[in-house]
Image: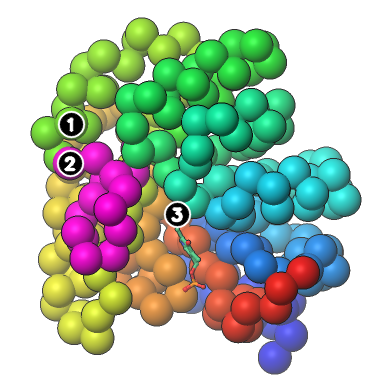
Amino acid sequence: MSITDNIQKIKKEISEKVKLVAVSKNMPVNYIQEAYESGQIIFGENKVQDLIRKYEKLPKNIEWHMIGHLQKNKVKYIAPFIKLIHSVDSIKILKEIDKRASQNNRIIECLLQVNISKEITKFGFMENEIEEIISDIQKYKNIKVIGLMGMASFSNEKKKISEEFSILYKIYKKYKILNTLSMGMSNDYNIAIKCGSTMVRIGSTIFGKKKYD
Ligand SMILES: *Cc1c(COP(=O)(O)O)cnc(C)c1O
């Protein structure tokens, strides 16, 4: 199966309403080029350095999404071009994105990362913190929070994964201003979609295993 075939297959499986982020972390530029030529426009990366390098080499209409933990001192490098940051996990980073977006005369779209499975990452907000941030969101003039992102536990238990995604969906549904729920990866995107995901982040099912660029 080629990258193009893999993307076609996934697109057939998921509803048209669910957006596909092709997670191209650790993949060489020519793989992304192939996916792009088959019509894929949204790509996700988890390192700032890779984002910059790939942004420079690849077509300018690609929508680059940051999906990995972001350090404050690196926000300025992606602020000029990043389309969506999935991994906003602190007020500190929210403030920095707002500042750098303003310097670039941009409004940067963000998702708040919610920690639904403490096993899998230490990053992300707790449910009660989401409430506070969203009620305060007008403070950040150059940020538009459009949704939430979360990761389920690495587990073979569908029920457990499903429960975690459902918790996230319930939080998401509390806020009318949100329209994007980023949940689901190669191993669990079918479950995520059943639980109300609107955006899936898929890497290895499209590109295969790690191939360092
Ligand atoms: C790597 C990664 C993905 C994609 O994972 P696959 O299992 O390769 O589909 C999705 N989301 C995040 C945050 C990631 O780091």
Q: Which residue is mark 1?
A: 129
Residue 59 is left or right of residue 123, and the answer is right
Q: Dots 2 and 1: beta carbons under 8 Å?
A: yes
Residue 132, relative to residue 141: is it above or below?
below
Residue at 70% from the left image edge and 53% from the top image edge = 50
Q: Does dot 2 land on a helix, a strand or a loop?
A: loop
Mark 2 and mark 3: Cα distance apart in space: 21 Å
Q: Is 157 included in the stretch rendered in magenta?
A: no
Q: Which residues are magenta?
A: 112-126
Q: Which residue is mark 2?
A: 126
Q: Does dot 1 land on a helix, a strand or a loop?
A: helix
Q: Does dot 3 land on a helix, a strand or a loop?
A: strand
Query: Residue 199 bears which disc, if any?
Result: 3
- Pick the residue in front: 97 or 82: 97
The three-letter amino acid code for the residue at tag 2 is: Met
Q: Is 122 included in the stretch rendered in magenta?
A: yes
Of label 1 and label 3, which has the lower sequence position? Answer: 1
The three-letter amino acid code for the residue at tag 3 is: Met
* Nearest-to-viewer mark from 1 and 3: 1
